[in-house]
Amino acid sequence: MKVLNVVDDFCTVEINGVKKSCFIGFLERKPEEGEYLLVHAGMAIKILDYQSAQEIIDELALLIDGELRDSE
């Protein structure tokens, strides 16, 4: 998810127009606006470079697309 802003130990992240609050207190450093995070259950797990983030987003999109087609 892309970091939109950072305030203390939380940030706002976004993917596909969906914005969420995310706890970043367990990261080694605070992310900067525009960086990408691997997020699970509202907590940041890792700061990602753009290329890694894009690969994960693309893979998830393929999985979701496949699931939607299977359910039709």
Image (tube, rainbow, N blue to C red):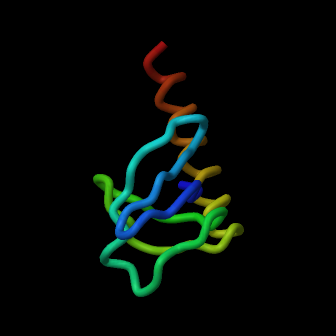
Q: Is residue 65 above or below residue 71?
A: below
Q: How many marks?
A: 0
Instruction: Name the residue located 51 percent from the left edge and 65 percent from the top edge.
Output: 37
Judge from the rendering whether residue 40 lies leftward or rightward of residue 66; answer left or right: left
Q: Position of residue 2 (x, y in %)?
A: 59, 56
Q: Position of residue 71 (x, y in %)?
A: 43, 18
7 or 36: nearer the viewer: 7
Q: Position of residue 7 (x, y in %)?
A: 44, 63
Residue furthest bottom in the image: 28
Instruction: Name the residue located 58 percent from the left edge and 64 percent from the top edge.
Output: 36
Q: Is residue 30 above or below residue 43?
A: below
Residue furthest front in the image: 7
Judge from the rendering whether residue 56 lies leftward or rightward of residue 46; answer left or right: right
Residue furthest top in the image: 72
Residue furthest right in the image: 51
Instruction: Name the residue located 45 percent from the left edge and 74 percent from the top edge.
Output: 46
Residue 50 figure quarter: bottom right
Q: Is residue 44 above or below residue 71?
A: below
Residue 3 figure quarter: bottom right
Judge from the rendering whether residue 56 lies leftward or rightward of residue 11; answer left or right: right
Instruction: Name the residue located 53 percent from the left edge and 55 percent from the top edge.
Output: 1
Residue 35 figure quarter: bottom right
